[in-house]
């Protein structure tokens, strides 16, 4: 793979492309091409124009417009971005190389209607808060959720006036409740993904263990000394692992 690959980085909820800069700067030597995608603001990929069931196809159009070679395009998605990477991998219409998925939920059980209903209500409640309450207070409440308790660092960003509406649209249109369960896809394509979870992110370590039990040939690992926000907690370690994983066969 002497010419390198196109690494397309997909940030998490409330994130932006620059979230990955600590990681990409830590790549020591690489011929890879980095695309730090601000997908929430993108006219093809934003939540208002590309809801979850259409996001994969929208990404396929975006990749074609950027003249990316699909078989040399590797997605790197964190949390919400990882879930969108799964959509692209399955339904972009392109033979994408694969995806490296960080702190990513493969989906609720398809028959667990109660969990899906509860997630819909939860995401709608947060969407209402982001739209109607002070940004600073809602952001503080969001960061106090249990899933972030093991994280060493919280990202510091400057938010635009459009951020509340974009956050609400992301919660509604990209809700986990709307996502299919990707376990069947992973059973059929066990080598198309590589999973990374922070060791202090107990919920997602359990998700990885359950995935491995269900799909024995699935590849993944636990990142030491990291919580859910692996890219902020361990940027140098993550860069080293991404550099190695990107050389693997997908």
Image (spheres, rainbow, N blue to C red):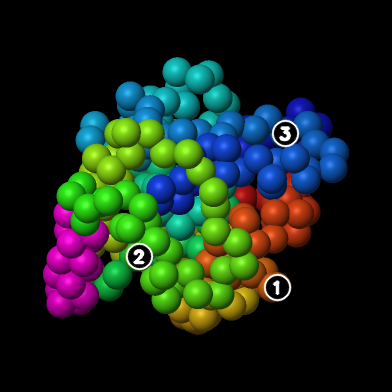
Label 1 vs 2, first from the N-terminus: 2
The front one of 159 and 176 is 159
Label 1 vs 3, first from the N-terminus: 3
- Magenta stretch: dominant SS? helix
Q: Is residue 119 magenta?
A: yes
Which residue position holds label 3?
A: 32
**Residue 108 % position (x, y):** 29, 70
Q: CA distance from mark 3 to mark 2?
A: 38 Å
Name the residue located 57 percent from the left edge and 26 percent from the top edge.
Answer: 69
**Residue 114 % position (x, y):** 15, 77
Which residue position holds label 2?
A: 141
Q: Which residues are magenta?
A: 112-128
**Residue 221 % position (x, y):** 64, 70
The front one of 73 and 151 is 151
Side (left or right) of 125 relative to 143: left
Q: Dot 2, how many residues are within 10 Å of its Cα: few (below 14), some (14-19), or many (20+)? A: few
- In the image, residue 153 above or below residue 52: below
**Residue 5 % position (x, y):** 67, 34
The front one of 130 and 107 is 130
Q: Is residue 249 magenta?
A: no
């Amino acid at each position: 793979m002497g010419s390198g690959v196109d690494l397309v980085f997909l940030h998490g909820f409330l994130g932006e492309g620059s979230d990955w800069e600590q990681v990409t700067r830590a790549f020591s030597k690489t011929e890879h091409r980095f695309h730090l995608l601000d997908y929430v603001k993108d006219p093809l990929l934003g939540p208002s124009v590309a809801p979850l069931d259409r996001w994969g196809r929208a990404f396929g159009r975006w990749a074609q417009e950027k003249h990316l070679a699909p078989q040399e395009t590797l997605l790197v998605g964190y949390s919400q971005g990882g879930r969108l990477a799964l959509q692209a991998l399955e339904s972009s219409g392109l033979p994408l190389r694969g995806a490296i998925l960080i702190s990513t939920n493969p989906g609720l059980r398809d028959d667990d209607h109660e969990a899906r209903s509860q997630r819909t209500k939860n995401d709608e409640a947060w969407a209402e808060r982001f739209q109607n309450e002070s940004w600073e207070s809602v952001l503080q409440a969001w960061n106090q959720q249990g899933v972030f308790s093991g994280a060493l660092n919280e990202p510091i960003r400057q938010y635009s006036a459009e951020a509340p509406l974009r956050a609400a649209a992301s919660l509604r249109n990209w809700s986990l409740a709307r996502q299919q369960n990707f376990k069947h896809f992973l059973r059929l394509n066990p080598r198309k993904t590589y999973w990374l979870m922070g060791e202090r992110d107990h919920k997602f370590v359990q998700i990885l263990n359950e995935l491995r039990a269900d799909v024995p040939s699935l590849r993944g690992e636990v990142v030491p000394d990291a919580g859910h926000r692996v890219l902020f907690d361990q940027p140098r370690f993550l860069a080293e692992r991404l550099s190695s994983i990107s050389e693997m066969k997908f």
